[in-house]
Image (spheres, helix red, strand yellow):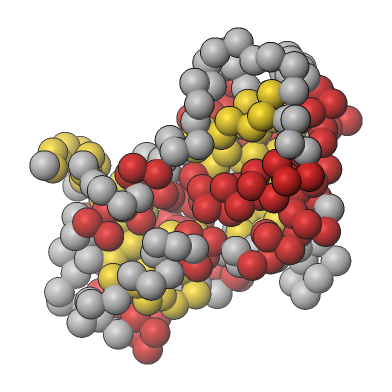
């Protein structure tokens, strides 16, 4: 079942899907419930869905007494919720600017701010698509068979802003803007393409590399200088109910175990090639 809303040439689609949609809240165990000691409530950007799941699994092996619940969504929407003191302990954003704003507003602990990676963009198509995205690159968006192009909503999704910027800098935006469909997050953007709601999408490299998309699609990496640098960071909220547990999760992400997982999922890291 699909419903469409059209505004000024941009189409926003809500699609009922099996594979990815069922996973959106797979790790969210009632995040609004009051947390007990030893529980970390995480708000994480949609591009981290599979990365964070692996991180939490590895973290729990080291710290089995700490419970972790994760909710995924767009960073901008989380910023709005956290500005109203939404019940989370730590925020992993796809744009470091949102955590920094929370610190300036006194809503997050200044000494807890961190950077965890630099994200990347790809143009992604289903594996069965006739579009030769590996050869065409950004020109794949201009293929005659492309009726809809999915990107995350630039108003509140950092990867949507990056996609829009890349399309403009590579000279295809004006010719494709009327075919854009907007996902609430970069993860929903991938769902649109997977379901056939769009023929091509611009999504995060981390999603393209991760199951279940890795074996279901093909992609071309957008040159990293074609869009603003995607520095991704986080912060611990000032109302965190178990700050030591939240700090332990942050420290794991920034340690060798977390860095190895981030690296496998396509993030560039501090101190490495093209890092911070």
- The residue at the far bottom in this view is 135
Image coordinates of residue 205 in percent, x first then y, are 52, 65
Which residue is painted at 56% across and 34% down in the image? 70
Quarter of the N terminus within the rendering? top left
Residue 273, quarter of the rendered image: bottom right
User: 70 left or right of 108?
Assistant: left
- The residue at the far right in this view is 111
Which residue is painted at 33% across and 70% down in the image? 216
Which residue is painted at 55% across and 74% down in the image? 223
Can residue 10 be seen here? The reply is no
Residue 38 vertical placement versus 263 (above, below): above
Residue 264, quarter of the rendered image: bottom right
Image coordinates of residue 87 in percent, x first then y, are 59, 16
Residue 171, quarter of the rendered image: bottom left
Can residue 70 be seen here? The reply is yes
Residue 4 vertical placement versus 167 (above, below): above
């Amino acid at each position: 079942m699909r419903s469409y809303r059209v505004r000024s040439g941009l189409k926003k689609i809500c699609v009922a899907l099996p594979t990815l949609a069922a996973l959106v809240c797979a790790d969210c165990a009632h995040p609004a419930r009051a947390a007990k000691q030893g529980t970390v409530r995480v708000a994480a950007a949609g591009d981290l869905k599979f990365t964070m799941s692996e991180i939490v699994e590895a973290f729990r092996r080291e710290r089995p007494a700490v419970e972790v619940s994760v909710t995924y969504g767009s960073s901008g929407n989380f910023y709005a919720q956290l500005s109203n003191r939404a019940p989370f302990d730590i925020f992993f954003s796809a744009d470091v600017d949102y955590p920094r704003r929370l610190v300036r507003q006194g809503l997050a602990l200044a000494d807890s701010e961190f950077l965890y990676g630099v994200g990347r963009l790809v143009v992604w198509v289903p594996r069965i698509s006739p579009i030769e995205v590996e050869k065409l690159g950004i020109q794949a968006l201009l293929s005659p068979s492309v009726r809809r192009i999915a990107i995350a909503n630039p108003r509140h999704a950092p990867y949507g802003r990056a996609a829009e910027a890349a399309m403009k800098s590579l000279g295809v935006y004006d010719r494709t803007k009327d075919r854009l469909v907007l996902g609430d997050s970069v993860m929903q953007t991938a769902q649109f393409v997977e379901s056939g709601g769009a023929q091509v999408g611009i999504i995060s490299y981390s999603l393209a590399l991760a199951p279940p998309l890795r074996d279901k699609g093909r992609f071309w990496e957008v040159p990293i200088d074609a869009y603003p640098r995607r520095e991704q960071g986080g912060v611990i909220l000032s109302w965190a109910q178990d700050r030591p547990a939240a700090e332990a999760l942050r420290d794991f992400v920034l340690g060798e175990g977390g860095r190895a997982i981030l690296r496998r999922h396509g993030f560039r890291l501090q101190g490495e090639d093209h890092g911070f």
